[in-house]
Image (spheres, rainbow, N blue to C red):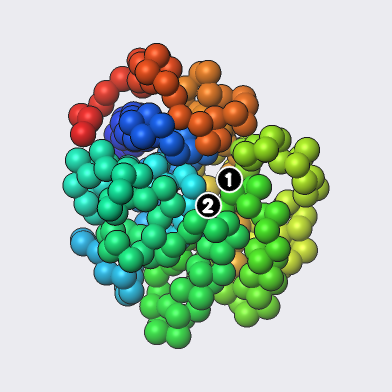
Amino acid sequence: MPNTQELQDLTTQVRRDLLRMVHKVNSGHPGGSLGCAEFLVTLYNEIMDLKPGFDMDGIDEDVFFLSNGHISPVFYSVLARRGYFPVEELSTFRLLNSRLQGHPTTHEGLPGIRMASGSLGQGLSVAIGAAQVKKMNNDSKLVYCLTGDGELQEGQNWEALMYASAKGVDNLIATVDLNGKQIDGPTDEVLNMGSVKAKFEAFGWTVLELKEGNNIEALIETLNKAKGLTGNGKPICILMETEMGNGVDFMMGTHHWHGMAPNDDQLADALAQNKETLGDY
């Protein structure tokens, strides 16, 4: 089990990976990827109970579904660094015939990917279905899901939220990345959703608030607390406040890096702020 410093070192390397990936093809979504690096590193290396190798059915192990699939660069890096596929394959991101497409898909057979998530708003529904299957199979392991805050503007989420509480899907932990930004600007300006916490609670979910979503110790504490609340008849939601572009000073505090790749000079600056820890691909 890694310690906090090891998780931080891995997060730094994941940031380097994803920055180099989007730079190489001048395409991708670095902002949200950087903001969720600590979360995915912590989830896959500290929190989830995983078996060696990859089995699509995920029987007797925790499973994760990425709903906001445009942050695929960070997801691919975390999976590769966890051993699901060679780290060197990250260099094929968004290239023709690569298994690492801009949004995760399943027909390429990439280990670690259980759903295609190019269209936003669908991941929570899939995660709920997987959680119900685990209950039907007397599988005690958990299902995790990550969605974006802007993604909650998609109506399918609210049907899923209603269904999960009505059916007592209490082996599910859904995390919402509350970075307050989406591709067109601040979420409150694009479509103000009011209190997301009040909405989840009104739909019958147990809600935890994580104010320091880029703090690994806080992530471990909150995710473990969420695990302790499962099995009590209600689905669990973590409202995780993050900083889009976290770890790269000129990408933080703005929505402009949601879907824009750094140029050569910007990449060099960003990498200088995140010194190599485990070795680049």
- Residues 202 and 22: in front is 22
- Numbered label attached to residue 74: none
Residue wearing tag 2:
68
Q: Amino acid at mark 1?
A: Asp
Q: Residue at x 47, y 22 (%)?
A: 248
Check the image and report above or below for 181 versus 139. Answer: above
Tell me the mark number nearer the camera, choosing from 2 and 1: 2
x and y percentages locating residue 154 in the rendered image: 68, 58
Q: Is residue 201 left or right of residue 27?
A: right
Q: Residues within 10 Å of mark 1 (few under 14, many from 20)?
A: many
Res. 77 image quadrant: top left
Quadrant showing the C terminus: top left
Q: Amino acid at mark 2?
A: Asn
Task: Please say if the residues under marks 2 and 1 sit with CB atoms less than 8 Å apart.
Answer: yes
Q: Residue at x 40, y 55 (%)?
A: 104
- Residues 223 and 149: in front is 149
Q: Is label 1 in a helix, a strand or a loop? A: strand
- Residues 180 and 93: in front is 93
x and y percentages locating residue 209 in the rendered image: 64, 46
Between discs 2 and 1, the one toward the N terminus: 2
Check the image and report above or below for 273 versus 58. Answer: above
- Numbered label attached to residue 177: 1
Q: Residues within 10 Å of mark 2 (few under 14, many from 20)?
A: many
Q: CA distance from mark 2 to mark 1?
A: 9 Å
Res. 162 image quadrant: bottom right
Q: Residue at x 51, y 18 (%)?
A: 249
* Residue 192 visible somewhere in the drawing: yes
Q: Is residue 108 left or right of residue 105?
A: left
Q: Residue at x 77, y 55 (%)?
A: 198
